[in-house]
Amino acid sequence: MAEREIHLKRTGLYASGCSPVNMIQAVFYNEDMLVYDLEDSVPASEKDAARILVYQMMKHHRPRDKYVAIRVNGLYSEYFEEDIQVAVRANPDALRIPKVEYAREVQEISRRVAEIEEKIGLEAGKIELICNIESYMGVLNAREIASADPRVTALTVSAEDLTASMKAQRTKKGLEVFYARNAVLLACRAAGVDALDVVFSDINDEEGLREDTALAKNLGFDGKSVIHPRQIDVVNGFFTPSQKEINYALRVLDAVEKGRKAGKGAVTLDGSMIDKPIELRARTTLAQARAAGIKLDGMVTIK
């Protein structure tokens, strides 16, 4: 199995596999993850053409500064077999798998990917899996799905299909998916994989997007799917540590280091006790900043 490289996933932008214009334009935006789509955005009559377009795009115009995924049709779809054959040969960073409900489905897809990797001489285990949780059953089984296979590097919540499966109404406030968000997030933390939040579907409501993204960040998500380029910079901004957060994290780790050198069992900063959760949060903040390309002047080394 290939060693995993850490990839930032603050934003994931879909580009339809049947729209050459969208696919080419998407390369020039600031999203961390670019998802070429063979599923919902592609009508049945265009599936074959979309596979060819995505494959050619990957082979000849693949962006070098982005994490690139291909969303295939679901395991039980009539299009899955042809999708996975083409998608693996295109050699993306990941396959994005829709409508995942059981760990065994992930394991079956991983097995199929491995067969194709071996057949074409691709490095074993290189292609990762991102599982879309789109139903109540997927939420109930999220923990097993997140840890089903070493290829799984993220789970993402898909609110529209999820609420339909629950006979719920989708609202901007999002109380109907609050439990599902937390269940998937906890599953991801237990498995050590990334948690990606729901799409905010009103592309004209920037204030609503800000509120929704602030909630996702505060809950603990690593990023969010977006459906329009104008959402990218807003979402990236929330999932990128601010200078104030970075400075505080540096001060926390500096205080911890000085305390250890002095043989202290407990340290304080600005009159407050620095415990393990605060230290961990500081480390996470600085790791996120590094991944975003932020230079950390004065960074201390903590063993």
Image (cartoon, helix red, strand yellow):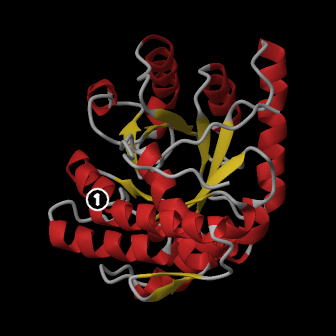
Read off the residue under disc 1. 243
Residue located at (79% from left, 53% from top):
105
Q: Which residue is drawn at 74% across and 44% down?
A: 151
For the point 46% across and 65% down, the residue is: 197
* Above or below: residue 114 compared with residue 258: above
| Position of 277 relative to 15 (above/below) | below
Is 260 on the left or on the right of 232, as rendered?
Answer: right
| 251 or 276: nearer the viewer | 251
Task: Name the amino acid, label 1.
Answer: Gln
Vertical position of residue 259 compared to residue 265: above or below: above
Q: Dividing the image into 4 quarters, which one contains the N terminus? A: top right
Q: In which quarter of the image is the C terminus?
A: bottom right
Q: Position of residue 119 (x, y in %)?
A: 83, 16
Q: Residue at x 38, y 30 (%)?
A: 18
**Mark 1 Cα shell of 10 Å, populated few (<14), some (14-19), many (≥20):** few
Q: Quadrant of residue 129?
A: top right
* Image coordinates for residue 141, horizontal then vertical, percent: 74, 72
Is residue 134 in view from this perspective?
Answer: no
Q: In which quarter of the image is residue 261?
A: bottom right
> Left or right: where does residue 88 sit relative to residue 70?
right
Q: Position of residue 161 (x, y in %)?
A: 50, 67
Residue nearer the viewer, 241 or 60? 241
